[in-house]
Image (tube, coloured by chain):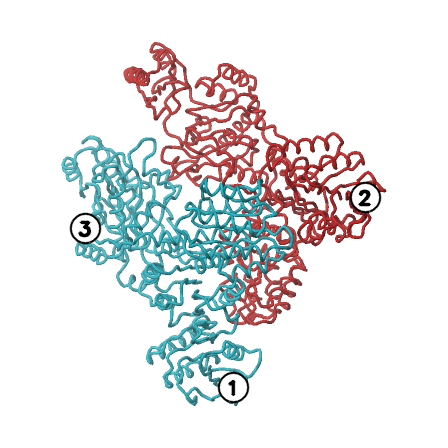
Chain colours: A red, B cyan
Amino acid sequence: MIGASTRIGSIGRALFDKLLRADFNGPVYPIHPHAEFVGAVKAYRSILETPGPVDLAVIVVPRPQVLEAALACAQKSVKGLIVITAGFKEVGEEGAQQERQLVEITRTHGMRMIGPNCMGVICTDPAVRLDATFAGSYPMRGEVAFASQSGALGVTILDYAASLNLGVSMFASIGNKAEVSGNDLLEYWKDDDSVNVILMYLESFGNPQKFVQLAREVTQTKPIIVVKAGRSEGGARAVSSHTGAVAGSDEAFDALFAQCRVLRANSIEEMFDFAMGLANQPLPRGNRVAVITNAGGPAIMATDACENLGLSLAQLSDETQQRLRERLLPEASVRNPVDLLPAATADEFQFALQQTLRDAAVDAAIVIFVPPLATGVVEVTRAISAVAADFDKPVMGCLMGMRGIATGFAELQRHRIPAFPFPESAARSLAAMVRYAKWRQTPRTLPARFDVDQKRVRELLAQALAGGQQFLSDAAAFAVLEAYGIPAVSHRLCRDWSEVQTCAVALGFPVVLKISSATLLHKTEAQGVRLNLRNRDELASAYLDLETRLRALQIPISQTQFMLQKMISGGRETLIGIHAVPQFGSVVAFGLGGIYVEALKDVALRVVPLCREDAEMLVQSLRGQAILHGVRGEAPVAFEKLHEILLRVSQLAQDFPEIIEMDMNPFLLFHEAEKCMAVDVRMRIKSAEMVEHSFKQID
Amino acid sequence: MIGASTRIGSIGRALFDKLLRADFNGPVYPIHPHAEFVGAVKAYRSILETPGPVDLAVIVVPRPQVLEAALACAQKSVKGLIVITAGFKEVGEEGAQQERQLVEITRTHGMRMIGPNCMGVICTDPAVRLDATFAGSYPMRGEVAFASQSGALGVTILDYAASLNLGVSMFASIGNKAEVSGNDLLEYWKDDDSVNVILMYLESFGNPQKFVQLAREVTQTKPIIVVKAGRSEGGARAVSSHTGAVAGSDEAFDALFAQCRVLRANSIEEMFDFAMGLANQPLPRGNRVAVITNAGGPAIMATDACENLGLSLAQLSDETQQRLRERLLPEASVRNPVDLLPAATADEFQFALQQTLRDAAVDAAIVIFVPPLATGVVEVTRAISAVAADFDKPVMGCLMGMRGIATGFAELQRHRIPAFPFPESAARSLAAMVRYAKWRQTPRTLPARFDVDQKRVRELLAQALAGGQQFLSDAAAFAVLEAYGIPAVSHRLCRDWSEVQTCAVALGFPVVLKISSATLLHKTEAQGVRLNLRNRDELASAYLDLETRLRALQIPISQTQFMLQKMISGGRETLIGIHAVPQFGSVVAFGLGGIYVEALKDVALRVVPLCREDAEMLVQSLRGQAILHGVRGEAPVAFEKLHEILLRVSQLAQDFPEIIEMDMNPFLLFHEAEKCMAVDVRMRIKSAEMVEHSFKQID
């Protein structure tokens, strides 16, 4: 411990004391420039003077001495550093430079480092017993691993875990994440058998795509619960599109977490609600909950919360109801919620819980107890614990009011039954378990790869970049779609009236005529589109209109082209697009279109690359998906085709991160797969170097 | 106290002991059939034997003796009863009958009664000091009044209030509400100067319309916070309409609460979050919040929560930032959130809070403190309290982690500064205050009354009722609209082709031809409508089509009429309707129409009668209101006219509760007020007696 201090109350002393108090399973050497001993332990002037090998160094010296300490560690062949000292990247450019040098030292000498600017690390493994933090209680041994990007929240969370008797396996405050990142911990905990639930408090992602890949693997066996702060600041908003602002990056994070099956909690409190159930109880097989109570009001609140969170109240079998009826008071309610009335005894709680858990229609139980007088809490909680142990179904306790409740909480927690002061928390905990259990039951496929013409797209983008274009021409954009097998309307690019009339005959009337110009993006608003031209006369008149319009806009006709398209009627209007979200990567957007529907902003996102389930979930997550299934007798759209198109768009976005925005609006969907197609497309690109810079940060 | 018991541990004894322990300001007489004394106080065999006058009797005898006890009270000229005893309406018909007799006795003898089946009453007025409850701690004196329909939650809530040091003025567990109702308490607390915040836990409403009227008055001076349980069961759903299920009755409750400016909390926890701010701090003048912290993570979470709840982070003035910069550490952040860094001293907290509250751009402050070591909590909370007292702006405290926090909480609460363990709760509390403050600043108008032909509608409804019709004929429904000045499309009712062709000429082409039949409700789906008939030929062909259609449906043409309407093109499709919600009264529904938009179910409700602000809020509460303002360059609809129409519909619903369902779908809105009109209307009625029965329950 480099920076151990003799001064009681200092961080350097608090840390040292905690190392000893946790009974670290090995020698701890305090390093101090001149003291002979620290806390009655012999001190050394330098790590190089310590008698034996050193695995881990905790560094708390002032910032100017950190680099020197790290170099000494390297010389001593130390494997790991925990740098508590602050004053690096978080305070400005000078600190950032020091931080880069620190990372350089660790990389050169093959050391791993947590921090700097962190609150330390805890490992409760009995073979280790490391508490290298300067705050918070040493937690109970358990199976929860926790990484926090905020030191202060780390403290709070350790205290909170202790108050809930939630056992911890490892804790790491990762500070500036200069070397070891959240992703590194995830990778480590993936294979650590002593960890069964992973909690993370995050403010930023260094490498979201790596997170997705790792989290997808980890969540196959262990749940991950994340609090992602910074919703409101959220960095830059998703690039605003043809159709108005589509989504903030926080929605992209929601999509990302759902896709890699990570449970996102909205607050620290909710994170613990989730963790209490997942860490302590078996996963439910379904979402049918039995509520057993001795008070009507809280049972109604539990029911409200359950249904609001997608759980359903189990329908107890006649047999179960009959058995309950025989044993309980005549005024008791034997339908779910089972209300034992205020005077319920521990025996009645035990019997009722047993009978309901035995019922095949019940997947989980919430037991609510409000002590009517200051007695019975321990008896009732013991009865609950005894029954719960006999079943492979989750049981949640809810103890309300204060009298004698503390002992009840302790009793339940000793038996690993989550105990909550309000029914809403119990329901939240169960809902998270049901969600995770359902994910686990759903097999994941790999992102689909279609046979596409990647080379052609590379050429098209290179041409545009070479020409300094920010937006692809209409023709190039349609060509990109074609190369990736994304169907689009038949179209021809024409330079003048003579070409227009020839092409119209080739396409067949009715047709649409548009100005095709990179300076005229919002064609409808600029009145640069003429729809449903049914014959040569209407086409001629439309052509002359557009010429007049160009003149009014002072755009030389020689620099403009005309896009002629087949007029498509009917179908359901949707929009399908790609957006590159800052610090994130690309997302596929899908929403309902049509000028009125667009005002309702019913658009959802998924992070690239999408697998088949992602495409399905993306479509299902729209509020107005009924429109796709058909309203007032319409036939449903070709969902299979729609999923395929979304997957092809995902592949395009993955292959070409330089496409920072693509909008197919409208993309028309029909019942017949072969009729589904993009009617308009807009594509914005950025230079390859800019792409490199944005996405290849090191986590 | 009738039923005082000598047996320690019994409810009859617990209650008696609590009466004495609270030091009731007058004599308490225990009534016991044979004991000479109870808890060392002389007992009497009957209330009639007590030596002095009795104001209030608490009854806890077994149910079979309750009526007799009540009669004795009447004889003794007791004014008030609190009946704790259970076993009445809640256990079945026999109990319900006993309850009716009990109410009969109280009414005959001019007594008021709380209960039966309740947990009792508390009044902390020093001149009274009544604790007639058998559970919960005697609360601190304060200005919160609380009514609970659940005894168990009453216990919990009293305990919770005590743990938060939230002072209580009165508490009443209202049980079966047989005589005194929640509305009665509201009326009482309205004029009680010792009450400044009213909390209610409700499971049902006896008389929602009276609640609305009372709550509208009360909330002009005192906030009301309600937890309404039973969302999911929610009684019957709103009658499903022409356009599919519109809304459950829980949404009707949301509308009701918003309309009478009642804050609805989703849980007991949230109710206390709201109450802590409103009961203890001044109302904010706006929604701009300053966050002062010594930890970054929690400040980000506070920011997220604020913005998510409609609060905004204040933009501190340059002067404020400058002053902070001069005094704080160079690494501190002087922009909002003001981050004082972990080592912040009490002085720094005091200075930063002072400077930010002094800034005119700040309406409220949240102060977050995470003790980095186990010191400083009391100093910091004292500093916060000292500054808060100097300003007329609300200050919320958030103390995180556990070390030393209890003393910090106590310190803040002693100075009436709400203290929370998580930043989200502080933000929720502030958001409720901002919402209530804004309501208070908005003047309320009386529901508008238009000059309408009420007599005509009465005749039309009477005719339909006489004919045993559930649905009004098209002609009658249009006539109702006309009588209330609600504009509708020009139309004619015709019996045969000869009338159809004459009327078409009178209306002018293009026209719409519909089958007008009570048995054919969903005309579009039954293909009973022909749109946009441009001339006599098209009309003739449509007429023959409909005749064929009628034959196919086996409806005799002689019993059917044809509705001929002017064809209206353009406009924005909306739906405007009336729905009678069970146990509730009528609501006005307004939503966006058109077959695709309807699938998104963007419909909102307001309870009848609406005032002008309600109509405006109703329109503003649609997700897709941008459609009404005009998308892609469209002009806005005639909002003034729309509000007027909604108010006229409200008046119709209020005047005729027998209209249990009315749907104008579509109601077309245009930029020009005179073009706005209903194009189709459907109206369902129920008999006058049924209406009486449903809505005139006694609360």
Q: Residues within 10 Å of mark 2 (few under 14, many from 20)?
A: many
Mark seen at residue A116: none
- Residue at numbered disc 3: B483
Indicate the position of residue A361 as horizontal and vertical percent values. 57, 56
State the CA–CA distance, disc 3 to disc 2: 98 Å
Indicate the position of residue A56 as horizontal and vertical percent values. 76, 41
Q: How many marks?
A: 3
Indicate the position of residue B187 as horizontal and vertical percent values. 34, 67
Of residue A3 and residue B25, the one placed in the foreground of this image is: A3
Residue shown at 42% from the left, 22% from the top: A489
Mark seen at residue A44: 2
Would you say residue B300 is visible in this rendering? no
Chain bearing tag 2 is: A
- Which amino acid, mark 2? Tyr
Q: Residues within 10 Å of mark 1 (few under 14, many from 20)?
A: few
In this view, the mark in front (3 or 2): 2
On the rendered structure, is A431 left or right of B509?
A: right
- Residue at numbered disc 1: B41
- Which amino acid, mark 3? Ala
Residue at disc 2, secondary structure: loop
State the CA–CA distance, disc 1 to disc 3: 72 Å
Of residue B320 and residue A218, the one placed in the foreground of this image is: B320
* B590 is higher (above) or lower (below) than A488: below
Q: Is there a contact, CB below 8 Å, between mark 3 and mark 2?
A: no
Indicate the position of residue B599 as horizontal and vertical percent values. 39, 41
Marks 1 and 2 on same chain: no
Quarter of the figure with the C terminus of chain B: bottom left
Residue at disc 1, secondary structure: strand
Marks 3 and 2 on same chain: no
* B363 is higher (above) or lower (below) than A671: below
On the rendered structure, is B675 left or right of B94?
A: left
